[in-house]
Amino acid sequence: MSATTADARSQSATRGGWTPNPRVATFLAEPHGLWIDDEERQASRGTIPPRVLDVVNPATGEPLATVAAASGSDVDDAVAAARGAVAAGTWARMAPEGREEVLRRLAQLVDDHTEELAQLDCLDNGMPLASAREEVAGAAAHLRYFAGWCGKLHGETITPYRTQNHFVYTEREPLGVVAAITAWNFPLDNAVWKLGAPLACGNSVVLKPAEETPLSALYLARLSADAGLPKGVFSVVTGTGEEAGAALSGHVDVDKVAFTGSTQTGREVVRASAVNLKRVTLELGGKSPSIVLADADLDRHLEQIVRAVMHNSGQVCSAGSRVFVQRPIAGDVAAGAKEAAARLRVGPGWLPTTDLGPLVSAPQLDRVLGFISAGSADGAELVAGGQRLGAELAGGYFVEPTVFAAVRDDMPIARDEIFGPVLSILPFDDLDEVVARANASVYGLAAGVWTRDIGAAHDLARRLAAGTVWVNCYNRFDPAIPFGGYRQSGYGRELGEAALDEYTQRKSVWIGLP
Ligand code: NAD
């Protein structure tokens, strides 16, 4: 590494008088290899110059770290290591009690390293440190919850319908090698959501984190070795989607791909999976409606309605970005949203005053600004925000929290996933109308309902085409509650008991009786 790059990295990480914890500083200063068989190794060993990806701090636009860029043959190595662990049975055939202990140890290590993991995601993704700490707590809870399933997975004995002469039971077996491909918006949680259930079920996992945010996954890999996860059971291949991601989803020795990302890439993953008909689960994009009825308790909930879009600078798959407001209160909601947006403080994630960090990358910034310009050009009323932030934030990818009123359903800001801090207010008159309009989307990830009328809440919850409906709350997640999409928001479920079905297969065993 050149001195200039190292200096730039340390400046980038310490800007604003804030210094990362020494372990984080050391971690950032080292170039990182792929994590395969419990060690870091260079991509395509021996290649000169080494194949690397530069990781950027989105709050400054400066270099943050360097990681390896896996080639197809590196992916082959990681899959071979995972397959080796499957063949040796080091994990799948370990007594469930032992697997549970390892996963609990990993959860504890995640807790113990909260500050390191949180700081890495704050610097890498841009999210505020407080959110990153919550993310780490969520990751540890997730691992504990799934650790608890290790000893509770079992088959059944089933009485056949047409014969008396057989004894039949089922067993639940792991699938084998699971490839996890994740997005950059919650780097640690996206990774851990694809680790808890498959590991509890006895699979090996090869993780390819998003190229923008690979750091916490590499840190987690080190912790997994300390927790006692056997060699080969968890690998991390950093690299691009086109190369490493495509190599995993098209790999004949991968039994399943668990994917989080855009709907467009999801389609490519499904196409590539056809090579060996591997299983696929998809957690994709959304354009979720958040429906505010005229009787909603705005004093209590308006802030939450706004945060349902703005949280993590809008980079949340379930963001409630289409805010349908019953006409009598549309003006009040627009005025309240304007004030709430103005109260959100935008800045680098490491400042304790920051509510919203930067967008993750320059392309994401351009995309979001493009949508904002299109909204104004299409005639939506810009109520708040709309600008990139300059002055001391000019080097980073910061956008003001933005609110549009009088938005029409056919405008791109109302139809397409923006993945930025942009809230659209769409007035409506009655429930039948809002259900039809809310459901008129290719997506179906989540929906919000804000009302004091319990009957209307249940009615809407039943009629909305979405994998999750939140009533008088939003963006609540829990390891025990299944999460996933309808329609082009994906298929399969993460979290909860439902996730276990995604990582096991059932075998029926027939015993002929005399
Ligand atoms: P993306 O689809 O560009 O990338 C996601 C991952 O796929 C990355 O790791 C990327 O390297 C990889 N990839 C890219 N091309 C690939 C290919 N051809 N084959 C295999 N892998 C490939 O998505 P993004 O821009 O990183 O993330 C934003 C998207 O993710 C949004 O649409 C968002 O809604 C979605 N998301 C969904 C959920 C959910 O749970 N539903 C959660 C987070 C993000």
Image: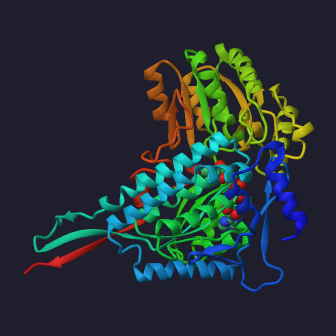
Residue at image point 50% right, 51% down: 140
For the question of whether residue 211 can be seen, the reply is no
Residue at image point 61% right, 42% down: 318
Outermost residue toward the bottom in this view:
46
Nearest to the observer: residue 273 or residue 61? 61
Location of residue 300 in the rendering, given as x and y in whole percent from the top left corner: 57, 19
Is 321 left or right of 170, judged from the image as shown? right
Quarter of the image where one finds residue 170: bottom left
Residue at image point 74% right, 72% down: 69
* 64 to 251, vertically: above or below: above
Is 100 left or right of 80, judged from the image as shown? left
Quadrant for the C terminus in the image: bottom left
Outermost residue toward the front in this view:
22
Quadrant for the N terminus in the image: bottom right
* 196 to 385, vertically: above or below: below
For the question of whether residue 12 can be seen, the reply is yes
Residue at image point 41% right, 51% down: 145
* 297 to 488, vertically: above or below: above
Location of residue 88 in the rendering, given as x and y in whole percent from the top left corner: 42, 83
Location of residue 97 in the rendering, given as x and y in whole percent from the top left corner: 32, 64
Nearest to the observer: residue 140 or residue 227? 227
Location of residue 114 in the rendering, given as x and y in whole percent from the top left corner: 58, 50
Is 509 left or right of 47, judged from the image as shown? left
